Amino acid sequence: MITKSLNIPPKEIFKSRDYVLVYESEEDIKNIKIERSVFDLINLDPGGVVVTATGTDSDFVSRYFTPQSSILEDPVTGSAYCSLIPFWSSRLGKNNLFSRLLSERGGQLYCENKNERVIVAGTAKTYSAGHIWIE
């Protein structure tokens, strides 16, 4: 059902918490379009669909989509990197990776595979600031 909602078929499909769809090129990832009426028939709770490929000026690129969500495409999804970092680290034979997210807002992440955990770093914009007291 997932592939029927995409305009470009993936060359490989893997399953972790999310579905990881691997494509031939960065250009494919940029050009992915989701047929929302078909995509929203899928229930992946929890999880979503990450599309990924090697990058032209980065180690890899990705985009992240969640069916049945008010926001179809998450601009930068840190949790997806728990799958992407070990995957690309193994494929590329390196533990330190640079990734670009190709959502409309975009993002750049510096990643490290530490085997039992992953490190993800980048810049963020403050959405809200405040204090919370727990009694």
Image (cartoon, rainbow, N blue to C red):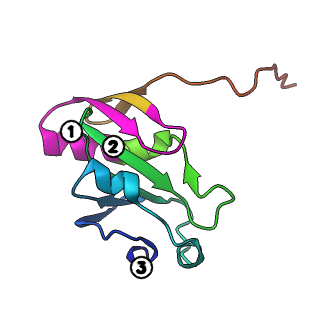
- Residue at the image position 46 percent from the left and 75 percent from the top: 5
Sequence-wise, the earlier of marks 2 and 1 is: 2
In the structure shown, which secondary structural element does the residue marked by tag 1 occupy?
A: helix
User: Within the magenta stretch, is there residue 44?
Assistant: no
The answer to whether mark 1 and mark 3 are in CB contact below 8 A is no
* Quarter of the figure with the C terminus: top right
Judged by depth in the image, the label closer to the viewer, 2 or 1, is: 2
**Left or right of 14 on screen, residue 125:** right
Q: Which numbered tag is attached to residue 135?
A: none
In the structure shown, which secondary structural element does the residue marked by tag 3 occupy?
A: helix
The answer to whether mark 3 and mark 2 are in CB contact below 8 A is no
Q: Which residues are magenta?
A: 84-107
Read off the residue under disc 1.
89
Q: Which numbered tag is attached to residue 4?
A: 3
In this rendered view, identify the residue nearer to me: 81 or 72: 72
At which x and y percent is residue 83?
35, 48
**Left or right of 106 on screen, residue 16:** left
Read off the residue under disc 2.
61
In this rendered view, identify the residue nearer to me: 117 or 77: 77
- Residue at the image position 33 percent from the left and 34 percent from the top: 99
